[in-house]
Image (cartoon, rainbow, N blue to C red):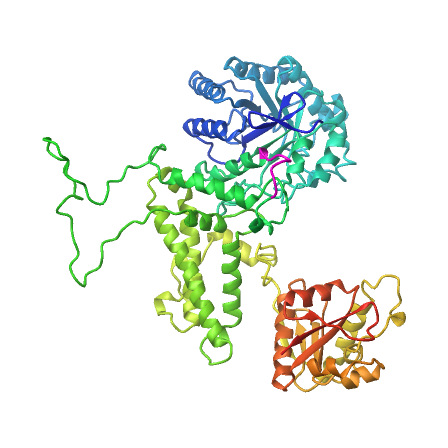
Amino acid sequence: MSGPGTAGGQPQTGTRRFISGVVEGFYGRPWTMEQRTELFKREQKWGLNTYLYAPKDDYKHRMYWRDLYSAEEAEQLIALISAAKQHDVEFIYAISPGLDITFSNPKEVAALKRKLDQVRQFGCRSFSLLFDDIETEMCPADKQTFSSFAHAQVAITNEVYQHLGDPEYFLFCPTDYCAAFCTPTVSQSSYLHTVGEQLLPGIDILWTGPKVVSHKISVESIEEVSSVLKRAPVIWDNIHANDYDPQRLFLGPFKDRPTELIPKLRGVLTNPNCEFYPNFVAIHTLATWCKATADGGQRDVEMAGDEEQDPCYSPQKALILALTDWLQEFLSTDQPGGLCRPSARLKKESSDEEPMQTDMGENSYVPGPGENPLYTAEPLTLDDLKLLSDLFYLPYEHGATARTMLQELDWLKNHSWAATAETDTTAEWRSRAAQFDDMCEAVVQMFNRLSNAPNRSILYDLYNYICDIKSGVGLARAYVKTLGGQGRPSAQPMNDDPEPWGFRGGLSGEFQRMLPCHGNRDLFRHPPMTAVYCIRSYCAEDKIVVQKIFREMQSAGEGKVPLMMQPPLICDSLSAGEISPSPQCALVLEDEIGVCGYALGLTDAKPAAAKIQRAVSDSVFKDFPALVTVQVLPRVTDPSPAKRMIGRLLSSIRSSGSTGVFCELRQNDRRMLDFYTKLGSFKPIQMAGLPHDIVAMGTSL
């Protein structure tokens, strides 16, 4: 396929227009006719060109696909198709007969043609056959006629396509519509190979990527499926779909799809949130992505932290553009359902007419000295919408502010011992608790300003979600206040007889909390919800298990070089039990299974260096007299227990009077090198005579 040029702001693939737009393909209440018309206006304004009509809960789209539309329904569809044409949006009518069709029965094929002929009479010129989310077992009659399920689908799709006169747009959704569904793999899927080889070349194929809801879609994965399908796919993108979880909404940008995909695709359609108005961001940012070109220039310096490093498209910049435009809609009363609010004080009209009487006029209440000021609804700001997007970001990640709030709450909870006892950490705890409280207050204020926005249509779509997050943040806020000794009894979120809002999720939540896997796939992986770690002092009985962990980790991932041929580390004799750690300088980590890690230290490393005949200059020992070694088993996937363990060890070494500590690592021990690097305090140090494959790192205490 040739690379995309642009015409009317849209990439071109060969002579065919790049399909870009929206699928209404979710489970739940379909959008209204007014909302769909509003969608067409937005698509035209933003440069998108397609709308795929496939709401799962339109009975005559899926369950009762054979039934023709009534005169009233026909009138609505005719108006909708006409509105799409007025805004240069291609209306693609999709039908899903796969629940109960008998492919081998000519009457069934005739019923399908009759239904599509009716829609064609409404002015529709593009169609789609969907075979997603259905049983794959054929009935006995179909098994006698067709060699495979794919063969049955392809035969009926080709026949309908030809019956409709080879329409320009005709989309086919396979039953195996993502890589996760393919058996055994995409490249070896007999189903996809049949579809690719036998489906007529004018028919385009829908594909959701590696998964139903794909985190990332790579160029390589699209090239692989394209070679099997013998055509570039149209992405049906579920990145913003929320019909699988009633408590989640996605207001983050279209991302993790490199713009290098554009010339490799026939098009992209987003199947977004069930709620219409919150999809402003999803559709707006998709439009920005579709318009990205190779000469789009480098991103701004401040965007260099974006994961994708796509020179043509920055998700964060696209998000700010979308939120800036969305803010104007929030503040507008022009939208359907908008409420025109009176100004705080009406000015006298220079007119002979009697002024309209309201209770907001000259005689409105004015508070006296010492009384509460009148409540004033502040206008919504762009920062409010940035916060809203951060709190309801994307399926695989929270926004930056949400991540910070979770990290701070975790730190405050884990260091709650410092909240009231006067220690070195107490001032930090109180400062961070105050900052956390400020973040919680920003959520409350965002809620208040959203609740007072003139555009009520958007608010009503958001209301359940923002109420829920405000309540969740409120519980966390009260909990932190309680830890700090500031909580009143009414503010305590956890007691023996809570109010109903003190426990979340109803019956579904109770089922999930009873299951052992609940929480182990939370987006916030620190700390893991299912593993409880204990850090305790090392005792003599731990020597054997520490030696075992040491041997296991030394033999893991060392390549073809036998351990005995590798130069020893100074800390090896410490881990192997040949030298005892200094007093108060040895800790072990335990989980539910048993000891899973250790941290050992020597306040004076000279004897250990002499033991392996390692010559170390006095200047190194002067700056870094102490030695540490840390090791954890691979089953400890969360870095926080090891960080807490070495933190306690360094504190003990500092208490002994030591001014610095160093460690030695083999270059092929990427896991521990990464661990020390991410700690931030350990830096590489020069040590004369160090074997070439050993790295020394040190930190001052």
- Residue 28 counted in the magenta span: no
Q: Position of residue 366 (x, y in %)?
A: 16, 53
Query: Taken as a whole, is the magenta stretch helix, strand or loop?
Result: loop
On the image, which quarter does residue 163 sit in? top right
Q: In the image shown, does 363 or 57 lie closer to the viewer?
A: 363
Q: Is residue 569 above or below residue 525?
A: below
Give 100 or 174, whichever is nearer the viewer: 174
Which residue is drawn at the image coordinates 70% and 38% (left, top)? 219
Q: Which residues make up the magenta segment?
A: 290-298
Confirm whether residue 502 shows in the render. no
Residue 269: image location, x then y, percent:
58, 32
Write the residue at 39% across / 59% down: 441
Q: Residue at x 71, y 79 (%)?
A: 600
Q: Residue 114: image x %, image y %? A: 57, 14
Residue 105 percent location from the top left of the image? 66, 18
Q: Nearer the viewer, residue 661 or 438?
A: 661
Q: Give the quarter of the image for residue 109.
A: top right
The N terminus lies in quadrant: top right
Q: Quadrant of residue 6?
A: top right
